[in-house]
Amino acid sequence: MSVEPRTIHLVGYASGVAASDSGCSQGPIVMQNSSYLFELKDKGANLQWDAMIKPNTSPLSPLNAVIQESKELAAAVSTIVKNKQFFTVIGGDHSSAIGTWSGAYSQVHQRGAMGLIWIDAHMDSHTPETSETGNIHGMPLACLLGYGHAALTSILTDEPKLKPEHVCLIGIRSYEAGEEALLKKLNVRVFYMEEVNRRGLKEVMKEALEIVNKGTVCYGITIDLDSIDPVDAPGTGVAEPDGLSANELCAVLPLIANDSRLIGAEIVEFDPHFDHDKKTEKLVSDLLAAMTFR
Ligand SMILES: [Mn+2]
Protein backbone atom coordinates (compact mmCIF):
# COMPACT_ATOMS: atom_id res chain seq x y z
CA MET A 1 0.00 0.00 0.00
CA SER A 2 1.43 3.33 -0.92
CA VAL A 3 1.41 6.17 1.55
CA GLU A 4 0.32 9.62 0.52
CA PRO A 5 3.56 11.67 0.67
CA ARG A 6 3.41 14.40 3.25
CA THR A 7 3.55 18.06 2.34
CA ILE A 8 7.02 19.47 2.87
CA HIS A 9 6.95 23.09 3.98
CA LEU A 10 10.19 24.57 2.69
CA VAL A 11 11.92 27.47 4.41
CA GLY A 12 14.98 29.02 2.75
CA TYR A 13 17.82 30.35 4.89
CA ALA A 14 19.50 32.56 2.29
CA SER A 15 22.40 33.53 4.48
CA GLY A 16 26.12 32.86 4.58
CA VAL A 17 27.11 35.50 7.11
CA ALA A 18 28.25 32.86 9.62
CA ALA A 19 30.70 31.23 7.16
CA SER A 20 34.09 32.39 5.77
CA ASP A 21 32.62 32.36 2.26
CA SER A 22 29.05 33.66 2.03
CA GLY A 23 28.34 32.01 -1.37
CA CYS A 24 25.97 29.49 0.21
CA SER A 25 23.48 32.35 0.73
CA GLN A 26 22.47 31.68 -2.88
CA GLY A 27 21.75 27.99 -2.27
CA PRO A 28 18.06 28.28 -1.39
CA ILE A 29 17.47 30.90 -4.09
CA VAL A 30 18.82 28.48 -6.71
CA MET A 31 16.70 25.67 -5.24
CA GLN A 32 13.55 27.79 -5.32
CA ASN A 33 13.99 28.05 -9.11
CA SER A 34 15.44 24.59 -9.66
CA SER A 35 14.04 22.49 -12.48
CA TYR A 36 14.79 19.41 -10.34
CA LEU A 37 12.32 20.57 -7.69
CA PHE A 38 9.71 21.33 -10.35
CA GLU A 39 10.23 17.78 -11.70
CA LEU A 40 9.84 16.40 -8.19
CA LYS A 41 6.54 18.25 -7.87
CA ASP A 42 5.43 16.80 -11.22
CA LYS A 43 6.16 13.34 -9.81
CA GLY A 44 3.75 14.02 -6.95
CA ALA A 45 5.86 15.55 -4.20
CA ASN A 46 3.93 18.12 -2.19
CA LEU A 47 6.43 20.94 -1.86
CA GLN A 48 5.49 24.39 -0.66
CA TRP A 49 7.80 27.37 0.01
CA ASP A 50 6.64 29.11 3.19
CA ALA A 51 9.42 31.63 3.77
CA MET A 52 12.82 32.86 2.58
CA ILE A 53 14.93 34.27 5.41
CA LYS A 54 17.45 36.85 4.17
CA PRO A 55 20.05 38.98 5.97
CA ASN A 56 18.93 42.44 6.96
CA THR A 57 19.84 45.08 4.38
CA SER A 58 21.53 47.25 7.01
CA PRO A 59 25.05 46.06 7.78
CA LEU A 60 25.24 44.15 11.04
CA SER A 61 28.09 42.22 12.65
CA PRO A 62 27.93 38.51 11.79
CA LEU A 63 26.79 37.78 15.34
CA ASN A 64 23.97 40.32 15.27
CA ALA A 65 22.94 39.16 11.79
CA VAL A 66 22.76 35.52 12.94
CA ILE A 67 20.78 36.52 16.03
CA GLN A 68 18.21 38.32 13.88
CA GLU A 69 17.99 35.58 11.22
CA SER A 70 17.78 32.86 13.88
CA LYS A 71 14.79 34.59 15.45
CA GLU A 72 13.04 34.89 12.07
CA LEU A 73 13.81 31.28 11.14
CA ALA A 74 12.73 30.00 14.56
CA ALA A 75 9.41 31.83 14.19
CA ALA A 76 8.81 30.35 10.71
CA VAL A 77 9.64 26.79 11.81
CA SER A 78 7.66 27.15 15.04
CA THR A 79 4.54 28.07 13.07
CA ILE A 80 4.88 25.04 10.78
CA VAL A 81 5.34 22.65 13.72
CA LYS A 82 2.45 24.30 15.55
CA ASN A 83 0.26 23.51 12.53
CA LYS A 84 1.46 19.89 12.76
CA GLN A 85 3.15 20.14 9.39
CA PHE A 86 6.55 18.85 8.23
CA PHE A 87 9.32 21.38 7.51
CA THR A 88 12.57 21.31 5.61
CA VAL A 89 15.00 24.20 5.88
CA ILE A 90 17.26 24.75 2.87
CA GLY A 91 20.51 26.64 3.60
CA GLY A 92 22.50 28.68 3.64
CA ASP A 93 25.23 28.13 6.17
CA HIS A 94 24.73 25.72 9.06
CA SER A 95 24.07 28.48 11.61
CA SER A 96 20.51 27.86 10.39
CA ALA A 97 20.36 24.97 12.85
CA ILE A 98 20.19 27.42 15.76
CA GLY A 99 16.94 28.95 14.51
CA THR A 100 15.49 25.77 13.03
CA TRP A 101 15.76 23.55 16.09
CA SER A 102 15.03 26.36 18.57
CA GLY A 103 11.79 26.95 16.66
CA ALA A 104 10.90 23.25 16.63
CA TYR A 105 11.80 22.87 20.30
CA SER A 106 9.52 25.74 21.30
CA GLN A 107 6.53 23.69 20.11
CA VAL A 108 7.76 20.38 21.51
CA HIS A 109 9.24 20.98 24.95
CA GLN A 110 5.99 20.96 26.89
CA ARG A 111 5.38 17.39 25.70
CA GLY A 112 8.96 16.19 26.13
CA ALA A 113 12.46 16.06 24.67
CA MET A 114 13.54 16.27 21.02
CA GLY A 115 16.28 14.19 19.35
CA LEU A 116 18.54 15.27 16.50
CA ILE A 117 20.64 13.39 13.94
CA TRP A 118 23.51 15.63 12.79
CA ILE A 119 25.07 14.49 9.49
CA ASP A 120 28.24 16.49 8.78
CA ALA A 121 31.96 16.31 7.97
CA HIS A 122 32.49 18.66 10.92
CA MET A 123 31.33 18.76 14.53
CA ASP A 124 30.01 22.36 14.48
CA SER A 125 30.48 22.28 18.24
CA HIS A 126 32.83 25.17 18.87
CA THR A 127 32.23 27.85 21.44
CA PRO A 128 33.62 31.38 21.03
CA GLU A 129 36.43 30.25 23.38
CA THR A 130 37.55 27.26 21.27
CA SER A 131 36.94 28.64 17.76
CA GLU A 132 40.00 29.96 15.91
CA THR A 133 37.96 31.63 13.16
CA GLY A 134 35.01 32.85 15.23
CA ASN A 135 32.74 31.65 12.38
CA ILE A 136 29.33 30.93 13.86
CA HIS A 137 28.56 28.13 11.38
CA GLY A 138 31.12 26.13 13.38
CA MET A 139 29.09 26.59 16.58
CA PRO A 140 25.39 25.68 16.09
CA LEU A 141 25.40 22.27 17.78
CA ALA A 142 27.15 23.71 20.84
CA CYS A 143 24.52 26.48 20.95
CA LEU A 144 21.67 23.97 20.86
CA LEU A 145 23.31 22.05 23.70
CA GLY A 146 23.43 25.30 25.68
CA TYR A 147 27.03 26.46 25.09
CA GLY A 148 28.05 29.68 23.35
CA HIS A 149 26.83 33.23 22.76
CA ALA A 150 24.01 33.86 25.24
CA ALA A 151 21.79 35.45 22.58
CA LEU A 152 22.07 32.28 20.46
CA THR A 153 21.45 29.76 23.23
CA SER A 154 18.25 31.54 24.29
CA ILE A 155 16.26 31.82 21.04
CA LEU A 156 12.55 31.59 22.01
CA THR A 157 13.33 29.68 25.23
CA ASP A 158 16.19 30.03 27.70
CA GLU A 159 17.06 26.40 28.32
CA PRO A 160 19.22 24.13 26.11
CA LYS A 161 17.16 22.76 23.19
CA LEU A 162 18.87 19.37 23.13
CA LYS A 163 20.08 16.97 25.78
CA PRO A 164 23.40 15.31 24.89
CA GLU A 165 21.96 11.79 25.16
CA HIS A 166 19.37 12.58 22.44
CA VAL A 167 21.90 13.72 19.83
CA CYS A 168 24.31 11.92 17.53
CA LEU A 169 26.66 12.93 14.73
CA ILE A 170 27.37 10.94 11.57
CA GLY A 171 30.17 11.27 9.00
CA ILE A 172 32.61 13.30 11.10
CA ARG A 173 36.15 13.52 9.71
CA SER A 174 37.44 17.07 10.24
CA TYR A 175 37.37 18.73 13.65
CA GLU A 176 39.39 20.60 16.24
CA ALA A 177 40.37 19.41 19.71
CA GLY A 178 38.27 21.99 21.58
CA GLU A 179 34.95 20.97 20.05
CA GLU A 180 35.71 17.26 20.31
CA ALA A 181 36.50 17.81 24.02
CA LEU A 182 33.08 19.43 24.54
CA LEU A 183 31.23 16.53 22.88
CA LYS A 184 33.32 13.97 24.81
CA LYS A 185 32.63 15.78 28.09
CA LEU A 186 28.89 15.71 27.33
CA ASN A 187 29.06 12.07 26.17
CA VAL A 188 27.50 12.82 22.78
CA ARG A 189 27.64 9.81 20.43
CA VAL A 190 29.82 10.52 17.39
CA PHE A 191 29.84 8.13 14.43
CA TYR A 192 33.14 9.10 12.85
CA MET A 193 33.62 8.41 9.14
CA GLU A 194 35.90 5.50 10.04
CA GLU A 195 33.01 3.77 11.86
CA VAL A 196 30.60 4.48 8.98
CA ASN A 197 33.08 2.87 6.56
CA ARG A 198 33.55 -0.13 8.82
CA ARG A 199 29.88 -0.83 9.67
CA GLY A 200 28.06 0.68 6.70
CA LEU A 201 25.73 3.67 6.77
CA LYS A 202 22.58 1.62 7.20
CA GLU A 203 23.74 -0.01 10.45
CA VAL A 204 24.93 3.34 11.76
CA MET A 205 21.63 4.97 10.85
CA LYS A 206 19.68 2.27 12.70
CA GLU A 207 21.72 2.90 15.86
CA ALA A 208 21.30 6.66 15.39
CA LEU A 209 17.53 6.21 15.28
CA GLU A 210 17.63 4.28 18.56
CA ILE A 211 19.51 7.19 20.16
CA VAL A 212 17.19 9.96 18.94
CA ASN A 213 14.05 7.98 19.74
CA LYS A 214 15.03 6.95 23.28
CA GLY A 215 13.39 9.23 25.85
CA THR A 216 12.17 11.74 23.25
CA VAL A 217 8.77 12.60 21.79
CA CYS A 218 10.14 13.33 18.30
CA TYR A 219 13.36 13.91 16.39
CA GLY A 220 14.81 15.88 13.51
CA ILE A 221 17.62 15.46 11.01
CA THR A 222 20.11 18.04 9.79
CA ILE A 223 22.18 17.24 6.72
CA ASP A 224 25.25 19.32 5.94
CA LEU A 225 26.11 18.66 2.29
CA ASP A 226 29.80 18.61 3.21
CA SER A 227 29.14 15.26 4.93
CA ILE A 228 28.93 13.84 1.42
CA ASP A 229 32.03 13.10 -0.64
CA PRO A 230 33.01 16.17 -2.71
CA VAL A 231 32.98 13.96 -5.82
CA ASP A 232 29.22 13.56 -5.30
CA ALA A 233 28.54 17.00 -3.75
CA PRO A 234 31.08 19.54 -5.01
CA GLY A 235 28.78 22.52 -4.36
CA THR A 236 29.70 23.30 -0.79
CA GLY A 237 32.03 25.78 0.89
CA VAL A 238 34.12 23.62 3.24
CA ALA A 239 34.49 20.37 1.27
CA GLU A 240 36.31 17.48 2.95
CA PRO A 241 37.50 14.38 1.04
CA ASP A 242 36.49 10.77 1.80
CA GLY A 243 32.89 11.45 2.77
CA LEU A 244 29.56 9.65 2.58
CA SER A 245 28.37 8.29 -0.75
CA ALA A 246 25.41 10.32 -2.02
CA ASN A 247 23.73 7.16 -3.29
CA GLU A 248 24.12 5.43 0.04
CA LEU A 249 22.69 8.41 1.93
CA CYS A 250 19.70 8.58 -0.43
CA ALA A 251 19.26 4.82 0.03
CA VAL A 252 19.01 5.01 3.85
CA LEU A 253 16.76 8.09 4.11
CA PRO A 254 13.63 6.10 3.21
CA LEU A 255 14.18 4.48 6.66
CA ILE A 256 12.78 7.73 8.09
CA ALA A 257 10.45 8.79 5.27
CA ASN A 258 6.91 9.09 6.59
CA ASP A 259 8.07 8.35 10.14
CA SER A 260 5.56 10.31 12.20
CA ARG A 261 8.21 10.92 14.88
CA LEU A 262 10.37 12.85 12.38
CA ILE A 263 9.23 16.47 12.69
CA GLY A 264 11.47 18.13 10.15
CA ALA A 265 14.77 18.30 8.32
CA GLU A 266 17.52 20.61 7.19
CA ILE A 267 19.69 20.43 4.08
CA VAL A 268 22.40 23.08 4.32
CA GLU A 269 25.64 24.56 3.01
CA PHE A 270 24.67 24.32 -0.67
CA ASP A 271 26.95 26.77 -2.48
CA PRO A 272 26.00 26.92 -6.18
CA HIS A 273 29.28 28.72 -7.06
CA PHE A 274 31.26 25.54 -6.40
CA ASP A 275 28.77 23.20 -8.08
CA HIS A 276 29.66 21.19 -11.20
CA ASP A 277 26.99 20.41 -13.80
CA LYS A 278 24.24 21.05 -11.20
CA LYS A 279 25.30 17.86 -9.44
CA THR A 280 24.74 19.23 -5.94
CA GLU A 281 21.54 21.01 -6.94
CA LYS A 282 20.16 17.68 -8.15
CA LEU A 283 21.36 15.99 -4.98
CA VAL A 284 19.39 18.42 -2.77
CA SER A 285 16.32 17.43 -4.78
CA ASP A 286 17.20 13.72 -4.48
CA LEU A 287 17.59 14.04 -0.70
CA LEU A 288 14.18 15.69 -0.48
CA ALA A 289 12.69 12.92 -2.61
CA ALA A 290 14.31 10.25 -0.44
CA MET A 291 12.72 11.79 2.64
CA THR A 292 9.35 12.13 0.92
CA PHE A 293 8.75 8.81 -0.79
CA ARG A 294 9.03 5.46 0.86
MN1 LIG B 1 27.88 21.75 9.42
Image (cartoon, grey):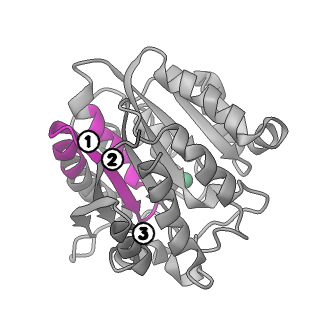
In the image, farthest residue toward the top: 215
User: Where is residue 29, by image quadrant?
Assistant: bottom left
Left/right placement of residue 240 relative to residue 252 reads right
Number of the label disc, if any, that sits on residue 103: 1
Please state which amino acid type lies under the numbered disc 1.
Gly
Label 2 with label 1: CB-CB less than 8 Å: yes
Residue at numbered disc 2: 100
Label 2 with label 3: CB-CB less than 8 Å: no
Q: Residues within 10 Å of mark 1 (few under 14, many from 20)?
A: many
Query: Which element is circle 2 on?
Result: helix
The location of residue 209, given as percent across then percent down, is 55, 28
The location of residue 115, given as percent across then percent down, is 44, 28
Marks 3 and 1, how far apart at CA: 20 Å
Number of the label disc, if any, that sits on residue 16: 3
The residue depicted at 40 percent of the width and 78 percent of the height is 34
Q: Is mark 3 within 8 Å of ligand 1?
A: no
The residue depicted at 45 percent of the width and 62 percent of the height is 93
What span is colored magenta in the figure? 76-105
Q: Earlier in the sequence, mark 3 or mark 1?
A: 3
Q: Nearer the viewer, mark 3 or mark 1?
A: 1
Query: Which element is circle 3 on?
Result: loop
